[in-house]
Amino acid sequence: MDDLSPLADQSFCYVTTTGRRTGNPHEIEIWFGWAEGLTIYMLAGGGEKADWVANIKANPAVKLRIADHDYTGTARVVTDDAEDALARKLLAAKYQKWQEGTEMSSWARTALLMAIDLAPV
């Protein structure tokens, strides 16, 4: 599926990273956002200290599952300011009913923003 729009309203996705010490797969359930294309966004409340983030920094190749759809992709820390702003608004609106003109929560403003660029299916 090259269009993720039918899956955008799902509550969670499942990200499988490779353990940086063990090499074993580690799966987490996490909130996600999608705007367009083949990139999804997640906020790491634990920032750089989150195990899944540390695993991604060691090996950015990940697996992703949304509902019954499986993907592979490359994860990264979002560094582009425009992409960062869009993704934070997207996640805050989806999970915290944030609206333009109101203040975002601390989580939405400060958590480490991660992206997964999915491989076309």
Image (spheres, rainbow, N blue to C red):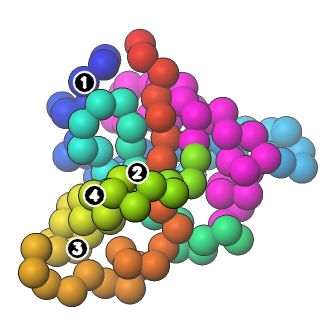
Left or right: 57 with respect to 75? right
**Mark 2 neighbour class, 10 Å CA radius: few under 14, some 14 to 19, many 20 or more:** many
Query: Which residue is under mark 2?
Result: 41
Q: Secondary structure at mark 2?
A: strand
**Residue 115 image position (x, y, % from top left):** 48, 47
Which is more N-terminal, label 4 or label 3?
4
Left or right: 79 with respect to 95? right
Task: State whether residue 84 is above or below residue 99.
Answer: above
Between 33 and 15, the one lying in front of the other is: 33
Q: Residue at x 48, y 21 (%)?
A: 119
Q: Quadrant location of residue 54?
A: bottom right
Task: State whether residue 78 is above or below residue 10.
Answer: below
Q: Residue at x 89, y 49 (%)?
A: 21
Which region is colored magenta?
50-75
Q: Secondary structure at mark 4?
A: helix
**Residue 3 image position (x, y, % from top left):** 24, 24
Which is more N-terminal, label 1 or label 4?
1
Q: Amino acid at mark 2?
A: Tyr
Which is more N-terminal, label 1 or label 2?
1
Q: Which label was assigned to residue 86?
A: 4
Q: Are marks 3 and 4 in contact (CB under 8 Å)?
A: no
Which is more N-terminal, label 4 or label 2?
2
Query: Which residue is under mark 1?
Result: 3
